[in-house]
Amino acid sequence: MPILTANNSNRPSFETYEVHFCALLANENKPQSVLKNHYEGCTRRAAEQLQSHPFWVELKANIQNWDALYIQETPNVEALFSGSFEQQAKLNCKTWSSAYNKAYRKNVLKNPNWPNSPDGDWVSAGTWFNTIGDILRTTLSTRYIDGVQFLAKRLVSLAEKHGLECRNQLQATPEGYYAGHVDIGFDFLIEDLSRTDIQSKVYVEFQITTQLKQVVKELLHSFYESDRLKSEKDVWQWDYRAPLFDANYLGHVVHYLEAQILKVRERNHE
């Protein structure tokens, strides 16, 4: 792998990273404006192919049936979620600014091999979809905590039906983030910097969470975004006056509360 900055282990700041990023071999010394247009064009093409893919079409048709199945398996409860598929699963394309931010974090802040490439490869124009797993993503929000695994299992089954690669994982972090992630791989046509069509494996992230967790996430999103660029972080669990202390423990409290709600619901239906 190429060396980013020879004989210099000093990491660039986010504000000065553009020069280093554009100089990566795969980026061909293109200006950031060209790399931005390339990224956004590839993302649009991938999104269009996803929305016409048989998997996505069948998901739209079946998700209301999954709602009915959940009610059948869990009598005397409200629906699994509210709203149509379009209201539930809005397809989000990661913006350029968010992707560039993540490239900086992966290439520099969290790269133990600096000034050489991180394990795997640089995040660059040649590896966007291989190194960033949530460029295309959507969120399904359930009323109850048990709905997360209920939906994850059905997404996996539908992906297998269509012969798609799939990764299914329950997320739980010290920072209070809890969600199900089902990453499904599609073979899409995008283009390289010379505008030649190439086939790329694009993983679409289906994030499954609860309605209450989604509300908390939206409230705290801007706070987490600003915190991500800090190169050194304090042991926040002991800094009880810091906003991060309240934000992270709120995630744990909500998860615990939702588990208790489910226990009460189960006792009432014994």
Image (cartoon, helix red, strand yellow):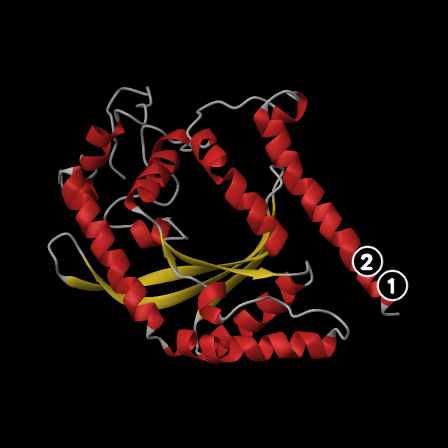
Residue 21 higher or lower than 132, as above or below: above
Residue 174 higher or lower than 115, as above or below: below
Q: Are marks 2 and 1 in contact (CB under 8 Å)?
A: yes
Give the CA separation, mark 2 to mark 1: 6 Å
Which kind of residue does numbered mark 1 sit on? Arg
User: Going 59% across and 68% down the picture, which residue do you hit?
Assistant: 151
Can you tell which mark lies on residue 263? 2
Query: What SS does tag 2 mark?
Result: helix
Residue 72 in which image quadrant: bottom right
Q: Which residue is mark 1?
A: 267
User: Going 87% across and 63% down the picture, which residue do you hit?
Assistant: 267
Query: What SS does tag 1 mark?
Result: helix
Residue 192 higher or lower than 24, as above or below: below
Residue 17 higher or lower than 26, as above or below: above
User: Going 75% across and 53% down the picture, which residue do you hit?
Assistant: 259
- Report the front residue among 97 and 100: 97
* Residue 212 x, y percent position in the rendering: 62, 51
Can you tell which mark lies on residue 184? none
* Residue 1 x, y percent position in the rendering: 27, 39
* Residue 175 x, y percent position in the rendering: 60, 37
Q: Is residue 193 visible?
A: yes
Which kind of residue does numbered mark 2 sit on? Lys
Q: Quadrant of the C terminus?
A: bottom right
* Residue 194 x, y percent position in the rendering: 10, 54
